[in-house]
Image: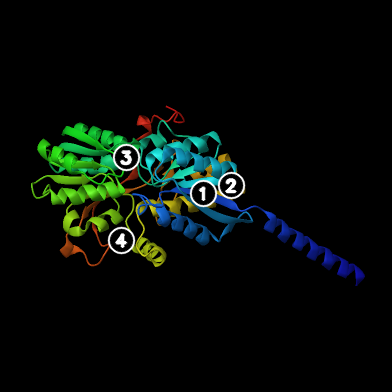
Amino acid sequence: MKRVRTVVLATALALAATAAMAQSKPPLKLGGILDMSGLYADITGPGAEMAARMAAEDFGGEVLGRKIEILAADHLNKADLAANIARDMIDNQGVEMIYDVAASATALAAGEIAKARNKIIMFSGPGSIRLSNEACGPYTVHYVFDTFAQANVTGLAAVKNGLDSWFFITADYAFGQDLEKDTTNVVLKSGGKVLGNVRHPLNSSDFSSYLLQAQASKAKVIGLANAGGDTINTIKQAAEFGVMKGGQKISPLLAFVTDIDSVGLETAQGLLLTEAWYWDLNDETRAFAKRFADRIKRPPGSAQVGVYSSVTHYLKAVKAAGTTDPAAVMKIMKETPINDVFAKNGRIREDGRMVHDMYLFEVKKPSESKARWDDYRLLATIPGNEAFQSLELSRCPLVKK
């Protein structure tokens, strides 16, 4: 009996020691660098942080015996601040993966820090094509959309429909410049022409002079190479100037359902736009949108669902690898197809581009909408290998040609 008690006691001590070791493991910290208060706050911001938290919760709250901890910081749309936050998260806070990094200039800055420290960084909110080209890295993933896909889908559809002369109103930073350049290439390649362009500072409030120049150009399409609050303000002021009534089309080259909600269907009706995801695509997207809206009070945008998907994909890879070592985790992430609420048969290429279907939508008329947020009519589903830049055109040094 004494020997049995000894064995039982030893087993109990071993189990207690195992439990203590598990509890002593540091949390797995994932850090979001977001626009929490500026012109992109609705696109990413608190919604992106919530999406990351939902991903951690749905995964069970821990991986490899480590509690998953979600961090978030506001970069205030300043590239130097984004770099400093990334540096502090990795060097001082123990963050092992950075997610989202809304806006392109801030993403490019944070990406360089992550690259120098061999840490995984997964972009959902930024669009610059540079992130999977010149600025690519072995642990960099560009997940949701990019300027090439946005330009390729929207620009091609517009020119095919006879909208073959363009004037651009462009946000004067990396994202806007790349979006204008990529759309110009599509327009010219499709037989259209570009009649001019004008650039505005980030977070502008007065677009009157830019719109007057666009009107004077007589271009059939005024392409908006901007995003968030800038896109909303441009469309609203274009309506006030009678641009649409004068026969010119406004084409927002990057717009989200939150933007359309802010503009209103009366003004936005008929707009053509490209999205990576929409809440009303199918039963699965509608169910996720309801869960999200119960917390945030509105459906998620594509960048926010991209955060949910990218964080989930990372956590699955960590579990499969049995480690958080970036090389081991990235290997599994690139080998494993992505099938979830965001994408079906998505895949991460060697340049870090996550390839998935894109969607061409037309904004509904007020009479066609059944309720708030019922804003889009699906025109076409574009396979990922047609929407995104091909590897043959890649400027990423990791791509072997």
Q: Pointer 1: what residue?
A: 31
Can see residue 337?
no
Label 1 Cα neighbours within 10 Å, binned few <14 / some 14-19 / many ≥20: many
Whole-Å distance between the Cαs marked 3 and 4?
24 Å
Residue under the point 71% across and 61% down = 19
Quadrant holding the N terminus: bottom right
Secondary structure state at the residue bearing disc 2: loop
Percent across and percent down for residue 312 are: 49, 53
Question: Left or right of 328: which side holds 122?
Answer: left
Circles 2 and 1 in contact, beta carbons < 8 Å = yes
Q: Pointer 3: what residue?
A: 147
First-in-chain label (3 vs 4) = 3
Q: Amino acid at mark 3?
A: Thr
Secondary structure state at the residue bearing disc 1: strand
Q: Pointer 2: what residue?
A: 93
- Who is closer to the viewer here, 263 or 136? 263
Percent across and percent down for residue 146 are: 34, 41
Instruction: Answer above or below: position of 291 versus 47.
Output: below
Secondary structure state at the residue bearing disc 3: helix
Instruction: Answer above or below: position of 201 versus 392.
Output: below
Label 3 Cα neighbours within 10 Å, binned few <14 / some 14-19 / many ≥20: many
